[in-house]
Amino acid sequence: MCDVITIGSATMDVFVESDDANIVSVYTKNKKSEFMSYPYGAKVEITEFTSQVGGGGVNTAVNFANLGLKTSAIFKIGDDIYSKGVLESFQNKNVDLSNIIQDPELSTGFSIILVSFQGDRTVLAHRGANAKMKKEDINFDAIKNAKLLYIAPLNGESNKVLDDIVKFANENGVFVCFNAGTSSIKRGFNYLKNILCTAQIVVMNKEEASLATQIQVRPDTREIKYSCEKIHPDVKEMFKKLKVSDYQIIVITDGSNGAYAYDGKNYYICPLFDGPVVSTLGAGDAFASTFCAALGRTNNDIGKSLMYASVNSAGVVSEFGATQGLRTFEKIEELLNQTPDYTYEIV
């Protein structure tokens, strides 16, 4: 039996940074969009270059193991040079790989991450085997014998196995943490609700929560009517729609504004843990998986678990690579002890 089994994607990530990259802002009447641009037709010099293994299934498995949990992973890869890199990356990571799926007919997922001078990124993603997971690929006995099933975002055909996996976990008393991805969300709220109702923990960023609930955060609302509110009223409406079962904890991350959680009674606000930002890739995976693990560490203290998650996420964004800056529970607690003013609020 393992403490946690993760299911999600595995990719070879190539990080590219160039001083020639520009950030272009485009305004319309109702929104502002930002784009990364390079001189058209030019040969652009690369300033920084590195490669790492990533993907939600990989990132979260490595994090859970780093936090001291007995961990197994389910992801699908090909049999190529990139799959060798994925498997080699798990050396000395204490993650059980007996449940991975390898198909020689498919290519391993591959991403090129264009990193801006601001630390944010644009990802060019080839899903490959990540989008081809089937029900018959899954070792359901491994899920049955786990205490926690962590579901990272799945894409393409792989998204179709979610119903069966979540239903099976629920029927066998396995705790479920669902980090919803856009592929699941785009299938509509009625589809998503079937998964939400059987997941004890649901984590989304604000943009995903808005897409899932079809609730837009109106920029003028707080200023005009709700200046005393610490959580935007539209975000509260998202929480209420997403929380479809009494036993659920819903978490919404909000970038530099930190993160919020709702348990049906209280709203929790946790600010961002301060630190340098090199690349934001993997921050969401670190946050969501740390929050799930920290609930056990803190005896289900939601606010404190948000703090643990923020500290670990801050470590990830301080380095290139989605798992390079991961911290242990001991290191997280050491940093929290060194910053006694950093805390959460309940409203």
Image (cartoon, rainbow, N blue to C red):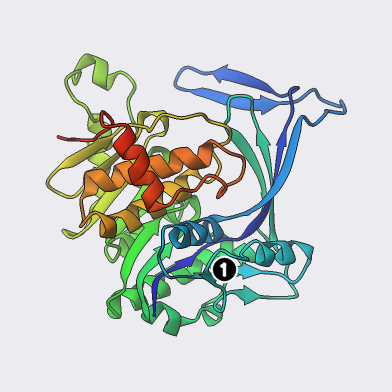
Q: Which residue is mark 1?
A: 75
Tell me, yes or no, if residue 323 can be seen here.
yes
Residue 174 in picture, x, y percent from top left: 31, 74
- Dividing the picture into quadrants, the one containing residue 224 is top left
Q: How many marks?
A: 1
Residue 130 in picture, x, y percent from top left: 61, 63
Task: Tell me what residue is drawn at x 27 percent, y 61 percent.
Answer: 200
**Residue at the top extreme of this rendering:** 224
- Which quadrant does the C terminus fall into? top left
Kind of residue at badge 1: Phe
Tell me, yes or no, if residue 215 can be seen here.
no
Against 341, residue 178 (above or below) is below
Task: Tell me what residue is drawn at x 70 percent, y 25 percent.
Answer: 37
Front position in the image: 231 or 339: 339
Against 38, residue 96 (above or below) is below
- Dividing the picture into quadrants, the one containing residue 335 is top left
Front position in the image: 303 or 68: 68
Task: Tell me what residue is drawn at x 44 percent, y 80 percent.
Answer: 142
- Which quadrant does the N terminus fall into? bottom left
Residue 276 in picture, x, y percent from top left: 51, 29
Whether residue 18 sits left or right of residue 226 in the image: it is right
**Residue at the left extreme of this rendering:** 265
Task: Tell me what residue is drawn at x 48 percent, y 57 percent.
Answer: 60
Mark 1 packing: few (<14 Cα in 10 Å), some, or many (20+)?
many
Residue 107 in picture, x, y percent from top left: 73, 65
Whether residue 261 sits left or right of residue 132 in the image: it is left
